[in-house]
Image (cartoon, rainbow, N blue to C red):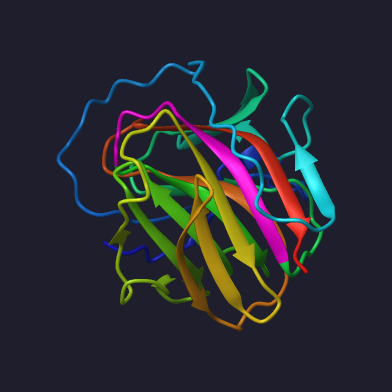
Amino acid sequence: MKPNRSVLFAIAALVFAALACQAVTGGGQDTPPGSDTQPPFDIPQPTIEIPSLFGGDVLLKDDFSSTSWGTGTDTDSSVEYANETLQFIVYTDNYFVWSTPDDTDYSNIHLEVTALNNSTDPDTSFGLICNMQITNVSYYFAVRFSGKYAIAKSMLASDDLFLTNNDAWAESDLIPQNAASYRVGADCEGDGTLTLYVNGQRIDSVTDTDYTSGNVALFTWSGKEPAGADVSFDDFEMKELP
């Protein structure tokens, strides 16, 4: 099921802050009800060390050893620093929460981040956002622990559009299922080309020219299992594309 997203704020105390973490309702494919036990907050996981395939000037690099991204916790989600990672835990099903490092507009960029899997729900989605114009208007690159993916476009007053696989989730043998960690990459090129990478391998590419610049963000999107979405991000890097 696709998200019909309306704007909500994940952390009420941070509504006034430029770096506030924001959330929007989202949808995932139907899954059987799961456990309602909250996953533990701090689970160490091995990371995948894959060298970047891309040159270019580094615009932003963060190992999350110091605080700069939007954080906060409420009844729907938690975004907090833990064990030198940025950890997202989502307590509400079908809920989309993101965090930004700053309020700068970027264009023609390559993004990479390592996502550590602490989740109990394989339909948890996670990934990267680029060219965010205003809240809920952006491109996002979603990967599921079940091996599915989407390159999508969020719009005001409209359902999100999956630009890949005829507006539906797609599967790729290049995305391992329920792995301990994933290195996710994305190109947001100046000509509108959008490309998703997982563990250094190209998964899919599309073209859309509606948004050419904007903020960047990390996100986690829960499935149907309450409190089943738990993703920690590490080793974020953003480079300028040639």
- The quarter of the picture where residue 85 lies is top right
- Give percent across and percent down for residue 83: 63, 17
- The quarter of the picture where residue 132 lies is bottom right
Please provide the residue range marked out in magenta: 109-122
- Give percent across and percent down for residue 89: 47, 31
- Residue at position x 68%, y 70% from top? 133
- The answer to whether any part of residue 172 appears in the image is yes
Residue 4 appears left or right of 109: left
Residue 189 appears left or right of 74: right
For the stretch drawn in magenta, the main secondary structure is: strand
Q: Is residue 103 magenta?
A: no
Q: Toward the viewer: 85 or 49?
A: 49
- Residue at position x 23%, y 26% from top? 35
Instruction: Determine whether 201 is above or below 229 in the image.
Output: below
- The answer to whether any part of residue 23 appears in the image is no
Instruction: Determine whether 100 is above or below 66 in the image.
Output: below
Instruction: Determine whether 99 is above or below 158 in the image.
Output: above
Residue 41 appears left or right of 113: left
- Residue at position x 68%, y 47% from top? 15
Q: Toward the viewer: 111 or 95?
A: 111
Q: Is residue 110 magenta?
A: yes
Residue 130 appears left or right of 155: right
